[in-house]
Amino acid sequence: MIALLRGLVVEKHPNQVLVETGGVGYDVTIPVSTFTKLPDLGGEVRLRIYTHVREDVLALYGFLTQDEKALFEKLISVSGIGPTLAVKILSGLAAADLILSIRRGEVEKLVKVPGVGKKTAERMVLELRDKLPAATGEEPGAPAAEALSPIDQDVLSALLNLGCARPQAEAAVRKAKAAGASLDFEPLFRRALELVR
């Protein structure tokens, strides 16, 4: 499975880029957000790749950042959203706006993306609301949340794996740190687990 592609930009279009590496040209479908940041023709690019395999198709979907690829993968996990529609969604809304719209349940904003109907938008909200990270500036007037350290992220991941909703898990990790819990994984995890219940 192809996960990363680095090479020269041979052709580029708003939804597609042709990347040559090792004498082979790879046709990669991309969202507009990736297209706008591509180098000029002949420039080197490094794309995170999602390889989509069906019985009749082998398609590559490329993203400049791992976060955008992860969001794409979350979108295609929603019933009724395939890779093509997921790219359209990422092209229609900036990643931060998309996350914010889903977390706030703004169906009317989501249906403005071509190909997204009301039922699909509602499914996106229902299935992804608690699975997406908080976008910066989500609470108007609230200070931006401090970034989580690698240990905090491990604790958060453990809480999510136990079935906790992301917003509550993030809040519990922050409260545990603020309450003076040790910065080691186990004590921080135990304190956060107590707070999330």
Image: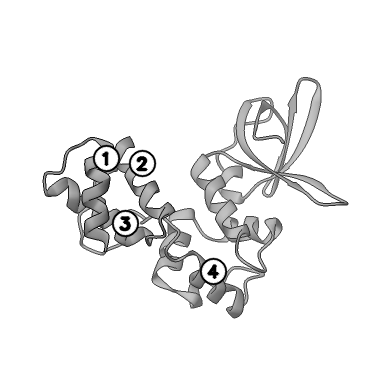
Instruction: Quote the CA–CA distance across marks 3 and 4.
Output: 21 Å
Which x, y percent locates residue 67?
49, 45
Q: Which residue is mark 1?
A: 186
Task: For the residues labelled 1 and 4, say whether their Cβ atoms are less than 8 Å apart.
Answer: no
Instruction: Quote the CA–CA distance across marks 2 and 3.
Output: 11 Å
Q: Which residue is mark 2?
A: 154
Label 3: few (<14), some or many (≥20) within 10 Å?
A: many
Name the mark nearer the viewer: 3 or 4: 3
Label 1: few (<14), some or many (≥20) within 10 Å?
A: few
Query: In the picture shown, does residue 102 fall above or below 20?
Result: below
Name the mark nearer the viewer: 1 or 4: 1
Which x, y percent locates residue 146?
24, 46
Type of amino acid at the residue the image marks with label 3: Ala
Which x, y percent locates residue 19?
72, 31
Instruction: Quote the CA–CA distance across marks 1 and 4.
Output: 34 Å
Q: Earlier in the sequence, mark 4 or mark 2?
A: 4
Type of amino acid at the residue the image marks with label 4: Met
